[in-house]
Amino acid sequence: MVQHEALLALLGHPGVLVARGKDGAFAVGECVDFLAVHEKALLQRIAAAGETYVALDAFVRCVREYGVWRDGAPVTDGLYLRALCTGLDEVRVARERVRAGCTRRFHT
């Protein structure tokens, strides 16, 4: 179960062991008392990576859908911004492949 929770947290989906705290951040739940300290620390690092992924995913979606704002006007054509979003899109596609593969394994 811990491995499944860790994988889901890494993919940006909180669960029972890794949940959203009061501040909205991913954190190892207080109910997790069966893991060693170093295991909890590793799970927390995984949770932080999942939270970072969620933030990057939201950023790319926002830029792609609405652009960014500069001087009261949307900007969607910056070379560096496009390059950043393209690179992040590649990460998102890889993530979706991993998620789909994991979903197939969980449901079989």
Image (cartoon, rainbow, N blue to C red):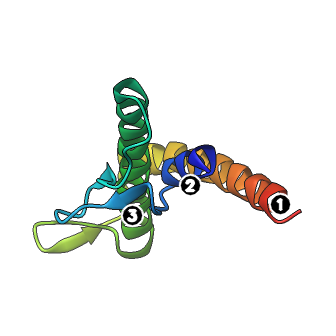
Q: Which residue is mark 1?
A: 104
- Write the residue at 38% across / 35% down: 40
Q: Earlier in the sequence, mark 3 or mark 1?
A: 3
- Write the residue at 43% across / 36% down: 35
Along the horizontal axis of the image, is 104 left or right of 89?
A: right
User: Quick check: 45 above or below 66?
Assistant: above
Q: Which residue is mark 2?
A: 8
Q: Residues within 10 Å of mark 1 (few under 14, many from 20)?
A: few
User: Quick check: 83 above or below 77?
Assistant: above
Q: Residues within 10 Å of mark 3 (few under 14, many from 20)?
A: few
- Write the residue at 24% across / 64% down: 24
Q: Which residue is mark 3?
A: 58
Q: What is the distance, in whole Å, between disc 3 and disc 1 at their CAs?
A: 25 Å
Nearer to the camera, 63 or 46: 46
* Amino acid type, mark 1: Arg
Q: Residues within 10 Å of mark 2 (few under 14, many from 20)?
A: many
Nearer the observer: mark 3 or 2; the answer is 2
Label 1 SS: helix
* Amino acid type, mark 2: Leu
Along the horizontal axis of the image, is 71 left or right of 61?
A: left
Question: In the image, residue 18 lies at what x, y percent?
Answer: 41, 54
Nearer to the camera, 52 or 5: 5
* Amino acid type, mark 3: Ala
Q: Residue 63's mark?
A: none
Label 3 SS: helix
Q: For residue 17, which quarter of the picture?
A: bottom left
Label 2 SS: helix
Question: In the image, residue 66 lies at what x, y percent?
Answer: 35, 75
